[in-house]
Image: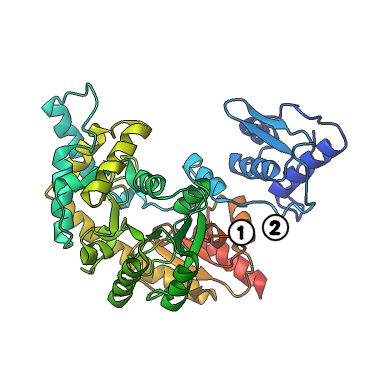
Amino acid sequence: MFALDPQLPAPLVSQIVDGFRRLIEDGTLRAGAKLPSIRQFAHAHEVSVYTVVDAYDRLVALGFFASRPHSGFFVRSRATGALAQTSTRGNYTFDSMWYMRRIFENRDLRSKPGCGWLPNEYLFGEGLKRSLRALVAEDVDLGGYGEPKGYPELRRLVRDLMAEHEIAATAEQVLLTQGSSQALDLAARRLVRPDDAVLVDEPGYANLLSSLRFLRARLIGAPRTPQGWDLEVLENRIKQHRPKVFFTHPRLQSPTAATAQMAHLHRVLQLAEKYDFIIVENDIYVDLDPEPRASLASLDQLQRVVYISSFSKTISPNIRVGFLAAQPDLLEDLAQLKMLSGLTSSEFTERLAYGALVDGRWRKHIKNVRERLAQDHQVASQQLLELGFELFCEPKAGMFLWARHPGVASAAELSYKAAEQDIMLGPGHLFYTDLAPSPWIRFNVAFCQDGTVMSFLKNEALSLH
């Protein structure tokens, strides 16, 4: 077919893309021809599966390949997939679906500082095992479906946990979901219609932005600052676009890890009242915050705020247990939408989460995770600053650092170089409404401790001077 040469200056991904492009353009590979599977190509050419995945994704984005579920990759007809650009670096689409698939399909990557979860050793694995043993001993009936709103005992516990954060609600105002992602999706599908103006943090939560684009919403960015939001710009955009809903993440926000100050929270609620929009507050990192502080929901008491959180970040991402809370009428609509889209959530995993949360060692576990992340922040911040990076803020808590290097114009290019070495970075453009090139990178500090990431960045930083 064609040969790859690791000694060439061109990265292997680019060599694969160029090789297939030549074969298609000279007619060697015709439209409709089935291509080698990713694993077949990787084995034949002695390269990593990850490298081939990257190359195939670029070829799909460039219009050379078509991906068919359960069938593989095929040469796309030139009439329907014409190539608009000739460069294979810098013009392809490094989009959020690419990012999600690479993370979730490549669990054995050497390093994942771009991911959004904690390493196994930070999770409550022992508590989950104890909960599982207790469930087995109880001989729980696994037949039938669970309650539409979720396991009642866990909903009551969520009510009590929210009360600790000064959010007053009944258990009937709590809807359990398959993680915060389903909660956000339910809120979006209930509140957003095509062409609606929707206010979102900028930079913001990449998965949510993708979901809203799928719903054909008009995304209006609310610029984040280390203190919260640029309030003047925010109000001007609200006046201009009159959004129906504001999806925001005030505490330890992804990707910046900034936390909004109290004055900013009050102002956002004032704007919501004045311009009549709903706020969906994503508070998934509340358990990682060492400081007791107000949320939009605690100030508003669920009048205009839909409150979303999750246990996946601190117990285990595998159990997929989250929740949302809202005023009663809206909550009933969301519960019905949950049933229409997927019936009930898993009572088994909800019971597992409940057992872990009432475990006597849960609060000590959370305290240890917070302390460990604080140490990770200190180390990662110092190393990035020594390499010449600028930090958006230094939160000293949560999972992330948001940073850029003066020598990097587009983090996507750096991310592809990292991918060649089995390192997954979080390039900044994924977190913006327009996906425009950005120098910013999201770092998960818990995955920056093995030396691999900083060694790669040090080599790249040296090459930029």
The residue under label 2 is which amino acid type? Gly
Task: First in sequence, mark 2 or 1: give its number.
Answer: 2
- Residue 123 lies, in percent from the top left, at 29, 49
Give the structural element (helix, strand or loop) at label 2.
Answer: loop
Q: Which residue is mark 1?
A: 412
- Residue 331 lies, in percent from the top left, at 26, 46
Which picture quadrant has residue 141? top left
The answer to whether 44 is drawn above or below residue 276 in the figure is above
Badge 2: residue crowd in 10 Å (few <14, some 14–19, many ≥20): few
Q: Which residue is mark 2?
A: 90
Q: Residue furthest right?
A: 26
The residue under label 1 is which amino acid type? Ala
How many labels were placed on the picture?
A: 2
Q: Which residue is nearer to you in this view: 189 or 174?
A: 189
Figure quadrant of the C terminus = bottom right
Label 2 close to label 1 by CB (< 8 Å): yes
Is residue 391 visible from the viewing direction of this image?
yes
